Image: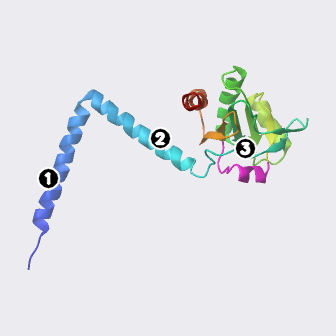
Amino acid sequence: MVTGGAPDLEKQQSLISGIQKTWRKIRSRFWLSLALDVLLIAVVFFAIHSWQTRYLLNDEAAPETLLALLDGSGVRSATNKGEPGVVYFFAPWCFYCRTSIGNLDSLVADGRIAWATAIALDYADSGEVQEFVDETGIDLPVLMGTGRTASDWSIRAFPTYYVIDADGAISSRSAGYSTTIGLWIRYKLLHIYKSAFA
């Protein structure tokens, strides 16, 4: 009877021991340890972002979308060709929408983003949407989206937003909470990219 268990076990133990020594060596050096931590955080962030946005539209023309304004003053396009901006989809019951839409509103109010449109989805009635607008205090134009709107833009989570370039094409997209700086950086990256490759 031939058994090969002992040599295999020794190889495994030797491999584990080598990994542990290398890990301790890396962790004992501050800058190397910090670089590894930053890399791991970036990889996790990128993986989560990729998973969250896997069904969203990208690098294509934004869907032609004309919707009624919440205030009843008429209909409006979701995009504004000629200038880059942001189309933001929210649900009035969504906590993260409630806490992040003000970030976008302040960027538009300060002129750091040319325009933004908020589109309400998954609401019971216009009163629920109006209550959301009143509570958040936003000044963005709010459009009343439909099931078709959600389908056309591939909306599966809230909030979801798209950065639209001056030609009306989608240049960036994201789902979930976004900080003021996160929104502004995505918007600015569009300008840098367009300037470099224009």
Q: Quadrant of residue 184?
A: top right
Marking on residue 14 = 1
Distance between mark 2 and mark 1 Cα atoms: 33 Å
Residue 15 placement (x, y as % from top left): 18, 52
Q: Nearer the viewer, residue 126 or 141?
A: 141
Residue 21 placement (x, y as % from top left): 18, 42
Distance between mark 3 and mark 2 Cα atoms: 24 Å
When the figure is inspected, residue 29 is found, relative to residue 92, above or below; the finding is above
Q: Residue placed at 71% from the left, 29% from the top? A: 83
Marking on residue 45 = 2
Give the left or right position of residue 16, taking residue 84 as reference: left
The residue carrying mark 3 is 91
Which segment is the magenta one? Answer: 146-159
**Label 3 element class:** loop
Q: Quadrant of residue 142?
A: top right
Amino acid type of the residue that numbered disc 2 sits on in the rendered structure:
Phe
